Structure formats: C-alpha cells, structure tokens
Image: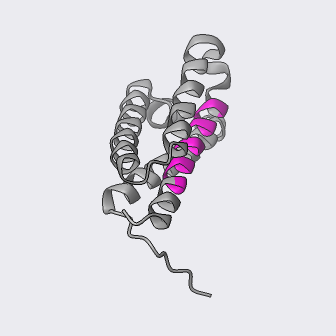
Amino acid sequence: MHHSHSHNETPIEKVGFYLSVICAIHCIATPVVMTVLPYLGSSLFHNHSWEIWFIGASVALAGALLIADYRKHHSILPLTLLLGSLAVKGIELLWTGEQYEFLTGFVGAILIASAYYVNWKAKASCSC
C-alpha cells in the first residue's frame, strides 16, 4: 500500500527531520561503536566539537522552521517538543554529565523528530 502525504514538506524540513533521526541513531550507536571499534568511537562518533556543532545546527534549523510554521497553523505542540529536547540536553549538561549522554541524546533527538512530525500534521490539517 502506497502512503501519500496530503501536505508538502519543504526540502529543508526533510533535512531537519532526517538530521534529528541521524542524531538519535548516533546517540544509540555510540556506546556500541565505542565498545566494538574504539578507534572510530574516539575519533569520529564521540567528538564533542562535532556533537556541539551538530546539536546547534539541528536545534537552530528546527527552531527557525517550527517558529515560521507556528505563525501559520498556531499549534504550540511542535515548539513544546523542541523545548523538551533542549530541556533534556540541559539536564544532561547540568546534572547527569556524560554518564547518560547516550540516553539523553537519544531522547532529545526523538523529541526533535517528533516536533517535525507533529508540525507536518498541523500543516496538513490547516489551510495555511
């Protein structure tokens, strides 16, 4: 069965959604990769400057897109989910540290991906 969307996602929205999904996969895969392939884990997958850039870009992109769409459909849930992802990252930075980074990163990325999904649904159901 072919599923077609009744709304049009812009290419940048698709990029943002897939970046958050890749981030979730990264957060789950890092502990496994670091255990099995220490060289890759320490040099590529667990590079803090790369993570900071990736998280910053993902949140900035999501924020810009979700705020622009909020002005059209007025659904606050996508922005709430995005703020939830920031709260999870804040909890990691302030209280849990790297001990639970794989879990907080995964939850944060899932929240951003969910924000995109809910936003797409809100756009589809409005006449904006």
Q: Position of residue 121 (x, y in %)?
A: 52, 61
Q: Is residue 84 visible?
A: yes
Q: Position of residue 79 (x, y in %)?
A: 48, 39
Q: Residue at x 50, y 65 (%)?
A: 125
Q: Residue at x 44, y 48 (%)?
A: 74
Q: Quadrant of the N terminus?
A: bottom right
Locate residue 28: give its quadrant.
top right
Please say which color scheme the image uses: one colour
In the depicted structure, whether residue 123 falls above or below residue 37: below
Span of residues in magenta: 103-118
Q: Position of residue 25 (x, y in %)?
A: 57, 47
Tell me if 84 is positioned left or right of 43 in this view.
right
Main secondary-structure element of the magenta-colored stretch: helix
Tell me if 29 is positioned left or right of 82 in this view.
right
Q: Nearer the viewer, residue 17 or 54?
A: 17
Q: Nearer the viewer, residue 50 or 92?
A: 92
In the depicted structure, whether residue 55 falls above or below residue 70: above
Q: Nearer the viewer, residue 76 or 60?
A: 76
